[in-house]
Amino acid sequence: MTSRSAAAAARATVHGYPRQGPNRELKKAIEGYWKGSVDADALRATAAELRRGNWQQLAAAGVHEVPTGDFSYYDHVLDTSVMVGAIPARHRAAVAADVLDGYFAMARGTQDVAPLEMTKWFDTNYHYLVPELGPDTVFAADSSQQVAQLTEALGLGLTARPVLVGPVTYLLLAKPAPGVAAGFDPLTLLDRLLPVYAEVLADLRAAGAHWVQLDEPALVQDRSPAVLNAAARAYRDLGTLTDRPQLLVASYFDRLGEALPVLAKTPVEGLALDFTGPAAGNLQDLAAVGGLPGKRLVAGVVNGRNVWINHYEQSLATLGTLLGLAEQVDVSSSCSLLHVPLDTGAERDIDPQIVRWLAFARQKTTEIVTLARGLARGTGAIAAELAANRADLASRAGSALTHDPAVRARAAAVTDADGRRSQPYAERSAAQRAHLRLPLLPTTTIGSFPQTAGLRTARADLRAGRLDAEGYEERISAEIREVLAFQEKAGIDVLVHGEPERNDMVQYFAEQLTGYLATQHGWVQSYGTRCVRPPILAGDISRPEPMTVRWTRYAQSLTERPVKGMLTGPVTMLAWSFVRDDQPLGDTARQVALALRDEVNDLEAAGTSVIQVDEPALRETLPLRAAGHAAYLAWATEAFRLTTGGVRPDTQIHTHMCYAEFGDILRAIEDLDADVISLEAARSHMQVASELATAGYPREVGPGVYDIHSPRVPDVAEATALLRKGLAAIPAERLWVNPDCGLKTRGWPEVRAALENLVTAAREVRGSLPGGAS
């Protein structure tokens, strides 16, 4: 029977694996290369060793087919731009002079050349480099990296499957290059791009690839008939090539929906589908189109984006249904395991019983292999694993950590009035102007200042007992004094204390709230060499005591200028954590908001007149399909208003967002009811300012004029030009001047120079405005 043969053939695989290494070896090697302490050969050797270790771990665990090509020095979309020859004109000389240095110049920029724009990868906290294309773009195949990684894996005796960003998704992720008319649609380049993919596929086949995976996650979003027709044409053309490997088209993060029958009809040999979370509907959709007769189905039943253990019995039920819908059913993660930490075995500070609720990349690999064995051989072959899984799931469900009656009662008692300020914005704005007495085009920063090696060492010494609490606090006090003194000397109007005591904008708060778990080694790549340790939101949330008041009060005591209180907002606390999957996100957001509300109120009581509640994740957490937008934005904006709704009218509430496409949430930005919003704008050349003006946004805005994700120091002329571009969209009385984001990852020399240039630009432009003389 078909189902029997499919079950016997069930194999385990994954879409991708964490790149950074167990001790962030790749980060250290790359940053050493940038500093000149590691040469190119040593960097390449480190990368090769990490790839080999990943593949061997996967194979040893029982994975039948390892992915190649998912490993990157910076970003896999940037790697795709290199593969297809889409090098921006301003970077071609650098790439021609040195391929590796040119690659990093595209990612980070140089003092003379701006980098590619960076934005979020769908609804994750991973950032990709946006391709720049135009009607004159000429593609040219360069499969050297993809072939080299495949050859490495085959040389180890492994079965390997190269993974590429698919051509349709690549074009949908792209933007018109600078100077190209805004109406240009990169998808019109598809017919020009497909022959390049054909050449790459032929090269991979010649190198020994039997299968190649083409990732098309952009097709899980709402797409027009034109896009669906483009996808049909792309995979008809690639599928009918004679010199190619077998093709597996992969999607993840949501349902394929209307794109599923389109891809199912193409002559590709297989599809990889996500069957977790919002993508669970793929099961019904697949049955509705009659399945995939004669094709391979790679079933993503293990969640690649969250850290909770799999529910084996539910996954086996899904897999059993799928057996009748495809010629061959293999078991996989829902997406690349890039989005989770490497190994729970490294965690020593989490209760061992709670660790059993968690699965990082290595544990998820074991889950996939276990499910594949159960599918192929029957549940009797994994009886012990099933029993242990049931016990661990029951342990979590019955834990006191996951149910705090007091927290739940407080959340249930919330009323609409709790989420509303006492006066409308116009009246609050007047009260704030009278209270703060700021000039036109007030200058500020987003919050953090450079986290120096000395600060990191002090935190490590405190944890290790080499530094006592008194010595650590004096180190923090000294850093705050230095940060405040610099800002006053530079002429910044609204100051920050610099956050020297904070390890991360989410983890710092998570470590002080009940219900959160913090990891020691749970690193996940955010962009390039930037890794974060997302905390785990495991239970009901409350705030035992103030978290930021002491240091904010101390900073304010050092200056007459206003010092912003700095908090991370409730949506970002969820988005940049691994959230619990046993209750609606909106319920969890309300709990976090109430804990933060207590902190906001305490900051105000301590004399803080400006409080910033950062929500950079508001856009990234937006559901990928429009049908889910309204419900999400309702609870997300309610959570922000609940956090900030209890302050006086003359207390100014700021929020901050960065590195996302804001056009889809402009109404929601207004619904936050913040007084001032600062936004990333430098790399996108003030695009967001125009979008806000077009939407009639009535509040104060600080579109960034300093790109902090690049080592470049913008000069006064550059900052002035961006500022004037902002003024063309936003009136001077509502325009703030600030960097794109926090300065934590930058060095002091560049920060000093850039902020001094920013203040000079603001003063020059201010002086040219009526009533704006400093």
Image (cartoon, grey):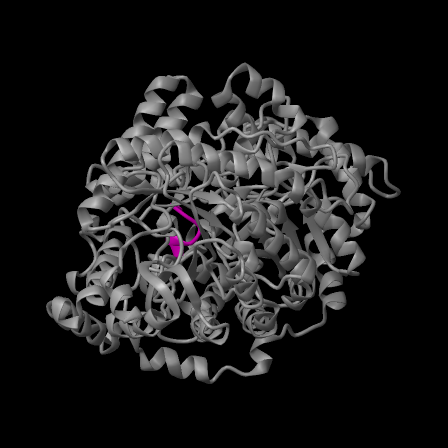
Seen in the picture, residue 79 relative to 700 is either above or below; the reply is above
Q: Position of residue 101 (x, y in %)?
A: 50, 21
- Who's the residue at 61% across and 18% down the image? 93
Q: Position of residue 673 (x, y in %)?
A: 66, 66
- In the rendered image, the quadrant that contains the N terminus is bottom left
Q: Is residue 276 left or right of residue 189?
A: left
- Who's the residue at 40% across and 22% down the image? 33
- Who's the residue at 55% across and 30% down the image? 141
The residue range painted magenta reads 501-509
Q: Residue furthest left?
A: 384
Which sits in the foreground, 210 or 586? 210
Seen in the picture, residue 438 relative to 154 is either above or below; the reply is below
Instruction: Say if the magenta span includes residue 759.
Output: no
The number of callouts visible is: 0
Where is residue 69, by image quadrant?
Answer: top left
- Who's the residue at 33% across and 51% down the image? 14
Q: Residue furthest right?
A: 770
Q: Is residue 157 left or right of residue 655?
A: left
Q: Position of residue 530 (x, y in %)?
A: 43, 39
Instruction: Say if the magenta span includes residue 505.
Output: yes
Seen in the picture, residue 470 relative to 207 is either above or below; the reply is below
Q: Is residue 435 left or right of residue 593?
A: right
Seen in the picture, residue 465 relative to 233 is either above or below; the reply is above
Which sits in the foreground, 174 or 478? 174
Would residue 690 be seen by someone viewing this image from the given angle? yes
Q: Taken as a whole, is the magenta stretch helix, strand or loop?
A: loop
Where is residue 324, by image quadrant?
Answer: bottom left
